[in-house]
Image (tube, helix red, strand yellow):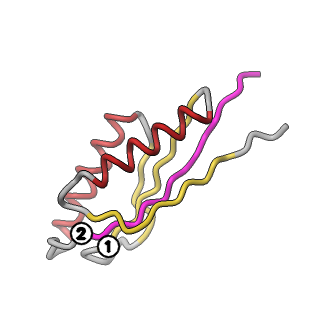
Amino acid sequence: MAIFHAAAMRVDLRLESVHSLKEKRHIVKSVTGRLQRTYQVAVAEVDHHDLWQRSTLAVAAVANSAGQVDRILHQVERDLRGDSRIEVLATSISFLEEPS
């Protein structure tokens, strides 16, 4: 049986310069697509769907080692912090334990 490691990161965002849900959706779709292509992770908006200037993303990563998963998620966080359209308010990472 192959061993794998998985983790999920929750990222709370503020999109201060956004003035409509259409504009917010455009930015969120752009960000999620870039993260998926660049880091090979799964990304979904999981909260604040109807608020213009807030969003919460969930990012999931799977790899052969816990260290690799941790590196991927921290790279995703750095990427988000470098995007001038958004402000990262908070992040949290939960590692998924494989049953023994």
Labelled disc at residue 15: 2
Q: Residue at x 55, y 54 (%)?
A: 93
**Circle 1 SS class:** strand
What is the crowding at mark 1: few (fewer than 14 residues within 10 Å), some, or many (at least 20)? Answer: some
Q: Quadrant of residue 52?
A: bottom left
What's the magenta region? 1-14
Please state the horizontal and vertical placement of residue 11, each as a whole percent of the image. 43, 60
Residue closest to the eye, 44 or 67? 67
Where residue 4 sits, quadrant-wise, is: top right
As rendered, which of 1 and 63 lies closer to the eye? 63
Quarter of the picture holding the N terminus: top right
Q: Is 96 on the left-hand or right-hand side of 38?
A: right
Q: CA distance from mark 2 to mark 1?
A: 6 Å
Q: Position of residue 29 (x, y in %)?
A: 26, 53
Pointer 1: what residue? 54
Name the magenta segment's main secondary structure: strand
